[in-house]
Image: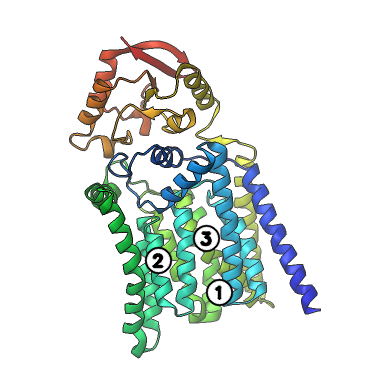
Amino acid sequence: MLKFIRKHIVFSVSMVVFLHLILLISLKFTAWPETSLWPYLMTKGWLPYRDIAIAHTPLMLVKLAIFYKIFGAGILQLKIFTWLLILFLDGIIFVIAKKLWNIKTASTAVSAFAFWQVLFDGNGLWFDLFMGGVAFVSFYFIQKKKYLLAGIFWALAFLSKQTAIWFLLPILFAAISGKRSTVKESIVKFALGVLPVISIFLLGIYLLRIFPDFWYWAVKFGIFILPNAQGQILLPDLKNLIVSAFPFLIFIPLILKTGRKNIHLLIWAVAGSLGAYPRFEYFHFQPAIPFLAIATAQFLNTFKKPDKLMRSFILIYLLGSLYLFGGFFMRNYKEGTRFYETNVSNVVTFVNYNTKVGDRIFVLNWWDNIYALTGTEPATKPWTPQLSWYMDIPGVQEKMIESLESDPPKLIIYNPYTISGLSSYVPQKVYDFVTENYRIRQRVDNLEILIKK
């Protein structure tokens, strides 16, 4: 009988994972241009930080570059990499929840993860998604009191995105919550796990001679300048704040009922959510979703016979969750791929027909995935995002102009600047150079194709 039940649960979990994949395929996918361009350039020999201005730590990009090197760079390859990663996270959550709790909790947690992972704009690859999965493995080893292994995986998470620093809060909480005699030992073991990973990484970038560039972009700029840059801070309005906070209300009755038993899940979830500041986006909550999923499973296992008040909460929570998911589903069902709309596809087709291998182009005020999707390379090196917090750094625009002068691009893809929004920022020196030296050849949708005068 027990064997039959286990087989039934495994089958049910397999169906949940399959439905998770169907949802991902059916809903709008966000193909962030950076996840196409940065690893693509790395496959072409461009070094991160020296040749590409990147404000994030590079582990995910290295993995993606290897994938692109084998299978090529493109939207389909990006989708496959992303979906395989998400399904792998389904499996990791099931295995870890089963080891730490039981198979029932594990199967429920996977279902909850699939639900919330999609709702929090998880159908797209960004650093938070990748980093959150690695940090979750660190959580497992913390629960097993294996601080050395926890340190290794936390270091890998930090090398995936700097906001992994927030997970030091629950790790420290776990260390000091143990026996007094083991607190120092736990911290030392954790540090011994972190040290070799960080040391190997630093040695690698030193041998590549990009340590000063890494220090500037990923540390000085990425940690201390970028979060406070004008235009970078984006706080949620009341509606977005309520939507993002609502799923986490499950922690209130869970902790009131179980006390300290599950408070560690809340601390890990809060730490995983802190990456949503200062630039609020739902996908920044991805590192918190595994802990929300387990909390949901724990809640359902704890309140088997809820009283009237708890029944009311469950009903409101269930209806609210379905309402949020239903609205999200209707807005995103069969909506294609963000950053690969028809106008992007048309430009890609045009560039492919009007360039040959080795040609360089320049994309001005438009999506940078054009380079990767057309197999071309930027005419400016180093490559720098055309955003105010990058372009206003002294010397950046001058270097771009030097590149454009020394190695003129065959084509410039220009999207006219708008009145408001990120596309309204004009890098004046670069813009002046382009308008003085290039003219319109033709238009493709709303974009102008420029050639040298």
What residue is at 32 percent from the left and 73 percent from the top? 191
Front residue of 34 and 255 = 34
Please state the horizontal and vertical placement of residue 396, each as a whole percent of the image. 22, 34
Pinpoint residue 411: horizontal percent, then vertical percent: 38, 18
Pick the residue in front: 296 or 129.
Answer: 129
Residue 329 located left or right of residue 343: right
Picture layout, residue 278 above or below residue 249: above
Q: Is residue 119 visible?
A: yes
The amino acid pointed to by label 1 is: Leu
Which residue is identified by label 1? 254
Q: How far apart are labels 2 and 3 at the CA level?
A: 17 Å
Residue 289 disc label: 3
Query: What residue is disc 2 on?
Result: 154
Residue at 61% of width from left, 67% of height from top?
94
Question: Secondary structure under badge 2?
Answer: helix
Within-10-Å neighbours for mark 3: few <14, some 14–19, many 20+: many
| 448 lies left or right of 405 | right
Front-most of residues 70 and 1: 70
The vertical placement of 95 against 452, above or below, is below
Residue drawn 30% across and 19% down?
408
* Mark 3 secondary-structure assignment: helix
